[in-house]
Image (cartoon, grey):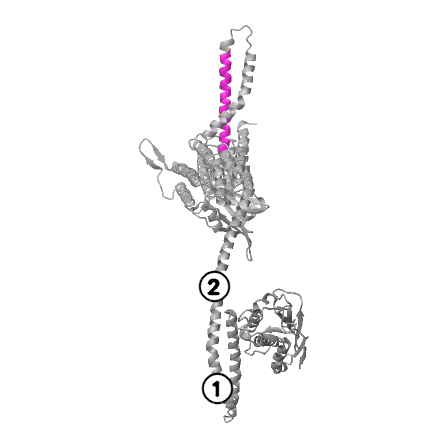
Amino acid sequence: MSQPILFMILLLIVAAFYLPALISVIRRHEGQEAAAALLGAYAVIAMGLTAVEALWRGGRLQAEPLLISDLQIYGALLLAVILLILTLEFTRRRIGTWLTIGLLWGAAIAAILSNILQVGEVVWTNGAITLPRERLAPALSALGWFVFTVGGLVIVRASHARSRQPLLRNRLNYWVAVFLLIFVNDILLIAGRQIPGNPLRVMAAGMAAYIIATHNPPDLRVIARRVLTYIITTVLIVAFYMVGFSASQTVFRALPNFNPMLVGAGIALLLSFIFTPLLALVRRMVDKWFHVGELHPTKTLHAYSQQISNILDMQKLANVAVGLIIDALGLTRGFLFLVDTEHDSERGRVYNIRAVRNPGERQIQILSLSEDNPLVRHFLQNQTPLLQYDLDLLPAYRDVSDTARGWFQHLEAEVYLPIFSKREWIGLLALGAKISGNRYTEEDLVTLSTLANQTAVALENARLVENLIQLNNELRQAYRDLDKAKRDLERLDQTKSDFISIASHELRTPLTTMIGYTEMLIEDRSLPEMAHEMLLGIAKSTRRLHEIVDSMFDIAQIDTRSLQLHLIPVDTAVIVKDVALKLEKTIRERRQTLSIEIPPLPKIKADPNLLEKLFQHLLNNAIKFTPDNGQIKITGRKVTAPSGDMTNGGIEIIVSDTGVGVDPQAREIIFSKFYQPGDLSKHSTSKTRFKGSGAGLGLALSKGIVEVHGGRIWVESPGYDEVNFPGSHFHVALPLSKDESMAGTEVNFRIP
């Protein structure tokens, strides 16, 4: 095989090395689709140029060397434009301006090649140097290559300078290496010293493919540190060996048993002993040059655990925990956040992230994230650190809202570590960049995750204490509010009592006058029949109003404890019967049945007028809340055993009905003044109509009358039901005194 053919095959093999870049287009990193496509175009064009060169050098393509050289220069310009646009796309910058410049530059070269402007054979000359028209296009292409290559390098360095993220800066450092390889390769090409096959361009394309396909490539600083460490160590060992061997030759050569091999073996043995400490010494020296701090995970974890374990104050815990982490890793800033969980009817589970800040510090706005947020899904599912670099670039976080993204960017943090306790997300550590500018290593992230786990217990304890303090403050405020409400209610109740007292006093006199004059007019038979009927209506309403005023007056006296009792021996059964007879007409109108079954009961000392009002209110209440055709029953019994304040026993009267009943939650409130059950707007103004409205004083007055006699009143009912009518039982217990032994009358009475 001839040498040209062999050389062509070797160049075609070199061209095949562009295939990995093409494969990276197919297996491109998500989010870098456009950059991968541009790299594919770059690889295809570069591979085509290498193939043309291979065919020409192998004799399969007949062309002038100058033409092939110009073609390579044009290709270098085109590749420089593509690489610049690829860089702009990778760094997420606008490509419009540079793309326009590239198109205009290409149009200018095409115009020169076609000589549209009718330029002469000589474009420029000063006598010594001449620029012919046929060399203008290659010269302009070489100038364009320089502009676009340097422009791409400037864009990379500008992005590197603006970036706060060491991971992104590390990735951009690879692009610097790409441009340097391209620069050296094409400088040699333009200068006529081209390396056959342009292997440096192949290396640059492979490195660019690696950068695009790899989200987090190895740290170049780490690689440089390791390479430099081993180079320095190797040089020192070689120097030590050479100096030692030379010195031994000078010192021990005169000895009769001198053996160079034994001397070399001794020096090698000595080097084996000092290699490890020498390597450690060189590593520390190189780390100092690169401003790399040494982290001692075990020591850091032990010190961290000891100092935060007994802290229960949330602000102190945040200051100590974040301060220890900042000092251990040499960070610029750090924040501790609490995560509060709540349930929202629309968004489901919501996580509120709030900062733990001292009162004098600038407060950070609370961020609310729903459970379907990509950030929440990452923390809950993976429970691993999240880098700001990943949040900015990975497509998985593309759906993060602008509000949440801006909130995290405002922190100027670089890594976020979730804190979990019992599988519940309770906190978040946000840590800034290292002061040295270095990236977080895997060892750093593992150590920080362990610190976050240790923080969980202390944070949970501090949260419990904080919740207890907050609950205690809320209870104190509630007590203060309740006390204020109590005082307000007392004032309101006193105001109502004052109003009742004043109103009842002021209304009694005019009402008495109205009743007297009305009755006198009714007795006058000379008046027309219609006027007589009108006077009867006025008299009825006036008496009704007088009853209400009397009730208000009695309530006022009860409230002021000024109700005067005229105690005499009273037969309760007789009073109940008298009240029932007065209401017989109303009971018959409602077609209700009233039965009284009261055995002979001891007479009690009581005010008969007040007892009559008591049973009148209770019976009116039973009639009003029992439907038509309902049943009302009054029974009585003697209470022999001591009960409450009734040390001598007493009597109990029970008024039962088949009415709507009483809500269990309203068994006490129905005895309040002015209480009205149900919808007041639907009540009638009749005092005996079914569920008719009254003044709301009957049961309150009943309770006052019973209690002023030393007794007790209560109600028993399954509940309130306007369909099934469960009914109610009102119990009145009145005490006996020591000398009350006279039996009363037995009453068995029924209406109708």
Residue 24 occupies quadrant: top right
Image quadrant containing the N terminus: top right
Tag 1, which secondary structure?
A: helix
Residue 498 in percent (x, y) is at: 47, 70
Q: Give the labeled residue for mark 1.
A: 517
Residue 29 visible in this rendered orientation of the protein:
no
- Foreground residue among 658 and 617: 617
Residue 542 in percent (x, y) is at: 51, 82
Residue 624 occupies quadrant: bottom right
Is mark 2 in CB contact (under 8 Å) with mark 1?
Answer: no
Residue situated furthest bottom in the rendering: 526
Amino acid type of the residue that numbered disc 1 sits on in the rendered structure: Tyr
Please tell me whether residue 91 belongs to the stretch shown in magenta.
Answer: no
- Foreground residue among 131 and 632: 632
- Foreground residue among 599 and 703: 599
Instruction: Read off the magenta span.
Output: 221-248
Q: Give the labeled residue for mark 2.
A: 488
